Image: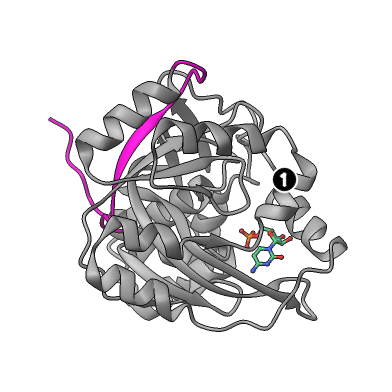
């Protein structure tokens, strides 16, 4: 199974709730960076991680705390079965980058195991299990462009007529999502949430200049407070000719919106002068789906 990275075109963050999570009004888009998960029947649970060139996955746990194995346990508990599998994760999504790579692994593992054991879990049940694993996991199942509410786990599709191109600038040093939300609270930034109507119109109109004006991330000030060095990259993107710079989720990955694939390549080659890894990715793309290797 293959599952995509996500970005947040709008990330509205309300005050923290009683359970410690924050109420969100967010617009997700799945982009063309993927992790693949292969599941094989085994006597005991295990997980391995391989990476595409230039990625550092040394922080990804290789024991039962790995989110893909937790997905397996929850799926077994849901069906009242005791089984185990070997999970092989091939990572292309930067780790701790605000791109929901762990959530992609969890979504891919859920569907891979469901297929492996022919459990025929309903879509509603898969989404509910995904929501327990993490706020972004349900979106990794559905993909496309979607409006997320609750703590991000309630997703509904959004009309999106665009074929967008993003330049993705990962950062060598990851940021903890929990730390960025804690900083957000410390700064006292929680506000009343409302659906981003201007963004919905821009997605339906499919014009990059219009979308650029509607991109917004409430977590940006908190991430910049923790990592002031990130501001330089925002300026570099603006200089490199991207339509807009957007912090991806809780960061530290930056995104530049480009007009088309050629524009994305131009902006990426400009940014590659100062950054070891710069990627181009289209969006929206599908959620978790089967791939066959040649
Ligand atoms: O749901 P997930 O495990 O991805 O969230 C990681 C952390 O991010 C949470 O433990 C919490 O500190 C923070 N978070 C939050 N509000 C959300 C989503 C995440 O405070 N809506």
Q: Which of 283 and 236 is in front in this view?
A: 236
Extreme-left residue of the structure: 294
Task: Answer whether residue 28 is visible to the viewer in this image.
Answer: yes
- Can you tell which quarter of the image residue 37 is in? top left
Left/right of residue 163 with respect to residue 14 in the rendered view = left
Q: Where is residue 259 in the image (x, y as percent from the top left)?
A: 26, 46
Residue that label 1 marks: 224
Q: Quadrant of the C terminus?
A: top left
Extreme-right residue of the structure: 186
> Magenta segment: does it hold 290?
yes
Q: Nearer the viewer, residue 79 or 189?
A: 189
Q: What stretch is highlighted in magenta?
A: 273-294
Q: Position of residue 117 (x, y in %)?
A: 32, 58
Ligand 1: quadrant of the figure: bottom right
Task: Answer whether residue 38 is visible to the viewer in this image.
Answer: no
* Disc 1, SS: helix
- Can you tell which quarter of the image residue 267 is in? top left
Q: Nearer the viewer, residue 45 or 36?
A: 36
Q: State how many labels appear.
A: 1
Give the residue drawn at x 68%, y 83%. 192
Give the residue drawn at x 58%, y 62%. 134
User: Above or below — where is 158 with respect to 180?
Assistant: below
User: Above or below — where is 161 with respect to 60?
Assistant: below
User: Above or below — where is 30 with respect to 135?
Assistant: above
> Magenta segment: does it hold 57?
no
Q: Label 1: few (<14), some or many (≥20) within 10 Å?
A: some
Magenta residues: mostly which secondary structure?
loop
Q: Position of residue 44 (x, y in %)?
A: 52, 42
């Amino acid at each position: 199974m293959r599952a995509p990275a996500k970005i947040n075109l709008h990330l509205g963050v309300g005050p923290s709730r009683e359970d410690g999570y924050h109420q969100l009004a967010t617009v997700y888009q799945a982009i063309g960076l993927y992790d693949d998960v292969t599941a094989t029947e085994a006597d005991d649970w295990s997980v391995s991680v391989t990476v595409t060139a230039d990625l550092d996955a040394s922080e990804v746990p290789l024991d039962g705390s790995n989110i893909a194995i937790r997905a397996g346990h929850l799926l077994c508990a849901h069906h009242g079965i005791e089984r185990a599998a070997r999970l092989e994760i091939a990572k292309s999504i930067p780790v701790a980058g605000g791109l929901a790579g762990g959530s992609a692994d969890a979504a891919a593992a859920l569907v891979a195991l469901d297929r492996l054991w022919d459990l025929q879990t309903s879509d509603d049940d898969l989404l509910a299990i995904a929501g327990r694993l993490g706020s972004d996991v349900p979106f990794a199942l559905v993909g496309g462009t979607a409006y997320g509410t609750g703590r991000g786990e309630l997703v509904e599709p959004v009309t999106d007529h665009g074929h967008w191109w993003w330049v993705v600038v990962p950062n060598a040093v990851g940021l903890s999502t929990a730390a960025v939300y804690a900083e957000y609270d410390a700064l006292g930034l929680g506000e009343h949430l409302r659906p981003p109507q201007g963004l919905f119109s821009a997605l339906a109109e499919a014009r990059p200049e219009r979308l650029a004006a509607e991109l917004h991330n409430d977590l940006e000030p908190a991430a910049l407070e923790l990592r002031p060095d990130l501001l330089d990259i925002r300026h570099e993107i603006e200089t490199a000719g991207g339509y807009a710079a957007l912090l991806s989720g809780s960061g530290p990955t930056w995104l530049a919106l480009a007009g088309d694939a050629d524009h994305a390549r131009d902006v990426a080659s400009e940014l590659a002068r100062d950054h070891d890894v710069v990627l181009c990715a289209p969006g929206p793309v599908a959620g978790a789906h089967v791939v066959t290797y040649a």
